[in-house]
Image (spheres, rainbow, N blue to C red):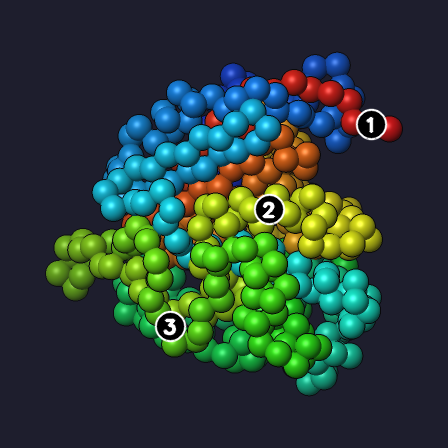
């Protein structure tokens, strides 16, 4: 769910990512927004096909200084047509580690909703008020299912129910707390709408809480069961689960996760948060592994999970401005929407357009990205000890290095 902590995390990514990308690309920061392959009038007219093997030495270099202050461990898995590379850093980080994937859960939720749309069990142009009467205040305008998925609903962000004061100390003290999705939504919609639906895009976890409730209403079954039967079981994702509300454990091999907490005496102490409430639920509560997320993204982009009409929604970013968040403030599309109905799009300094999603929970920062043709893909998971986003320069280094080296070809047509 969108919290002040996550707002700061994305702000840090926008700033540190832009600065680091400028350094890697050898350009001044202001030029990043205009960075395009030479001889091309529009970044949208170019696709980058990543040929050859990943640069293993450069990838190993991204982990060479870990663990470090603020990051206790990491794992990275890079794949594609040119081969694979994987690496870990830090004590007790297994290559097959499970981890809390945070908002990558949103991609699973969107996929289930799009499948239900393909089955004509719901309409993306139908409204929340139609399917879930009484969930939103009567004063709210109609909000469509599609607007939930691409974050153009205008619904307000989360209140203080699940974020407290946004500090490591608050989370450490409340790591086992949970709330029902209905409680989380009710807390958020006590506030006014952020903007008129369909006029802007603001990344907002409340959209996905509502989408999860919609899945359960339409199917009559739990969200966890729908993910299991529609995605995890058919794809053989044995490490991927939607935990029960009271299941705080992280099953299977995993890296320990912790946060640094300042005590009443002013001394910083490390608190283990490996066990924590999984109830950001459909919005951010799932557990998976690098191998499973690689397989999921591969199947999704190959069209194994969605028919053509719904598959097209994954790559249809609305033409609206970005509103009050930093998620979409990197690269040539800065200031504009960057989320489709399920995925985030980003254009890297070398011109590569990648699709995927990031996720974060205290103690975990993860992501999965791929070129649309799957010529290169990356899954990463870091274990940061703070909530300020200080790990994001490392995230940006991992992502840009993973998609380095490639040839540019005009898109067909």
- Disc nearer the start of the sequence (1/2): 2
Q: Position of residue 397 (x, y in %)?
A: 44, 31
Q: Tag on residue 27?
A: none
From the viewer's perspective, tell me whether residue 387 is left or right of residue 180.
Answer: left
Query: What is the distance, in whole Å, between disc 3 and disc 2 at their CAs?
Result: 26 Å
Q: Which residue is mark 1?
A: 412
Q: Nearer the viewer, residue 51 or 149?
A: 51
Nearer-the-camera pick, 360 or 156: 360
Residue marked by disc 2: 297
Q: Which residue is mark 3?
A: 247
Q: Earlier in the sequence, mark 3 or mark 2?
A: 3
Residue 285 visible: yes
Q: Is residue 153 visible?
A: no
User: Which badge, 3 or 1, comes first in the chain's sequence?
Assistant: 3
Q: Is residue 132 above or below residue 114?
A: below
Question: Where, quadrant-wise, is the C terminus in this rendering?
Answer: top right
Mark 1 falls on what kind of element?
Answer: loop
Calculate the distance from the C-alpha at mark 3 to the C-alpha at mark 1: 48 Å
Residue 245 location, quadrant: bottom left
Q: Position of residue 411 (x, y in %)?
A: 78, 27
Q: Position of residue 111 (x, y in %)?
A: 66, 58
Q: Residue at x 28, y 53 (%)?
A: 256
Q: Residue at x 66, y 25 (%)?
A: 49
């Amino acid at each position: 769910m969108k919290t002040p902590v996550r707002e700061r995390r994305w702000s840090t990514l926008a700033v540190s990512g832009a600065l680091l990308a400028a350094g890697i690309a050898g350009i001044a920061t202001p030029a990043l927004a205009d960075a395009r392959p030479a001889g091309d009038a529009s970044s949208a007219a170019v696709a980058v096909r990543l040929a050859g093997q990943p640069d293993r030495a450069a990838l190993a270099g991204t982990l060479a200084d870990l663990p470090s202050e603020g990051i206790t461990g990491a794992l990275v898995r890079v794949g594609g047509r040119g081969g694979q590379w994987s690496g870990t850093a830090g004590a007790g980080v297994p290559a097959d580690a499970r981890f809390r994937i945070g908002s990558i859960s949103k991609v699973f939720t969107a996929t289930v909703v799009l499948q239900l749309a393909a089955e004509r069990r719901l309409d993306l142009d139908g409204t929340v008020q139609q399917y879930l009467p009484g969930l939103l205040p009567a004063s709210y305008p109609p909000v469509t299912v599609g607007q939930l998925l691409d974050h153009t609903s205008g619904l307000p962000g989360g209140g203080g129910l699940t974020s407290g004061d946004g500090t490591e100390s608050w989370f450490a003290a409340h790591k086992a707390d949970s709330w029902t999705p209905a409680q989380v939504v009710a807390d958020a919609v006590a506030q006014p709408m952020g903007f008129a639906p369909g006029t802007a895009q603001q990344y907002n976890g409340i959209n996905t809480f509502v989408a999860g409730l919609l899945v359960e209403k339409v199917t009559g079954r739990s969200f966890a069961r729908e993910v299991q039967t529609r995605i995890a079981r058919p794809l053989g994702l044995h490490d991927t689960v939607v935990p029960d509300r009271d299941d705080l454990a992280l099953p299977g091999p995993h890296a320990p996760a912790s946060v640094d907490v300042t005590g009443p005496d002013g001394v910083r102490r490390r608190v283990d948060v490996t066990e924590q409430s999984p109830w950001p639920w459909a919005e951010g509560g799932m557990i998976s592994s690098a191998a499973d997320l690689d397989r999921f993204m591969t199947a999704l982009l190959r069209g194994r999970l969605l028919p053509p009409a719904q598959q097209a929604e994954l790559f249809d970013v609305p033409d609206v401005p970005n509103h009050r968040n930093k998620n979409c403030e990197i690269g040539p599309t800065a200031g504009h929407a960057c989320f489709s109905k399920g995925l985030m799009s980003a254009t890297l300094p070398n011109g590569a357009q990648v699709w995927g999603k990031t996720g974060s929970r205290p103690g975990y920062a993860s992501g999965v990205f791929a070129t649309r043709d799957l010529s290169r893909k990356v899954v990463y998971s870091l274990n940061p000890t703070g909530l300020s986003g200080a790990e994001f320069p490392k995230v940006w280094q991992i992502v840009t290095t993973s998609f380095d080296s490639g040839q540019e070809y005009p898109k067909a047509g």
